[in-house]
């Protein structure tokens, strides 16, 4: 089964985030880095499960992970842990994913 583009975007976002968190300062890796990594992996796994098992669709839970990641990225940017470019790149990918998920959630409610 071919998964929709939102899954591909989410998967690529998770890879990009993992590459960035690998280089966080040691003081932030176990806290902010871990929180971002877990939220991104949870988001990806929950999305895959939701897409493959219609009875287990939980777009609200996935969107909750998107919100968590937005807060974490903002913190990382303000703490100057991520460069402005890295922060903007990850934030724009996350915004795109959020919009796609919002569309899926709206579509699910209409069916």
Image (tube, grey):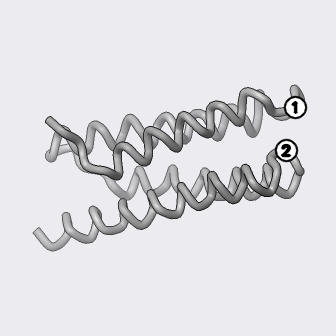
When asked about the image quadrant of residue 109, the answer is bottom left
Residue sitting at 38 percent across and 58 percent down?
60
Residue sitting at 70 percent across and 52 percent down?
73
Instruction: Verify CB contact (< 8 Å) between mark 1 and mark 2.
Output: yes
**Residue 67, horizontal then vertical, whole percent:** 56, 58
**Residue 42, horizontal then vertical, whole percent:** 46, 37
Identify the element where label 1 is drawn: loop
Mark linked to residue 5: none
Q: Earlier in the sequence, mark 1 or mark 2?
A: 1
Q: Is residue 39 above or below residue 57?
A: above
Q: Quadrant of the N terminus?
A: top left
Apparent side of residue 96 relative to residue 105 in the rendered image (left or right): right
Residue sitting at 23 percent across and 44 percent down?
51
**Residue 99, horizontal then vertical, whole percent:** 42, 67
**Residue hosting label 1:** 25
Q: How many other residues sit within 10 Å of disc 1, few (<14), some (14-19) or many (≥20)?
A: few
When asked about the image quadrant of residue 101, the answer is bottom left
Apparent side of residue 73 relative to residue 42 in the rendered image (left or right): right
Residue sitting at 75 percent across and 55 percent down?
85
Q: How many other residues sit within 10 Å of disc 2, few (<14), some (14-19) or many (≥20)?
A: many
Residue furthest front in the image: 85
**Residue hosting label 2:** 81
Identify the element where label 2 is drawn: loop
10 and 49: which is toward the camera: 10
Q: Between marks 1 and 2, how big is the CA–CA gap?
A: 7 Å
């Amino acid at each position: 089964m071919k998964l929709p583009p939102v899954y591909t975007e989410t998967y690529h976002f998770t890879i990009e985030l993992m590459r960035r968190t690998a280089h966080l300062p040691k003081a932030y890796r176990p806290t902010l880095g871990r929180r971002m990594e877990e939220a991104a992996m949870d988001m990806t796994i929950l999305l895959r499960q939701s897409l493959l098992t219609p009875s287990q669709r939980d777009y609200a839970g996935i969107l909750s992970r998107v919100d968590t990641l937005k807060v974490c990225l903002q913190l990382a940017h303000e703490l100057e842990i991520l460069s402005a470019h890295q922060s903007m790149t990850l934030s724009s990918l996350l915004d795109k994913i959020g919009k796609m998920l919002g569309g899926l959630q709206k579509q699910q409610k209409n069916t």
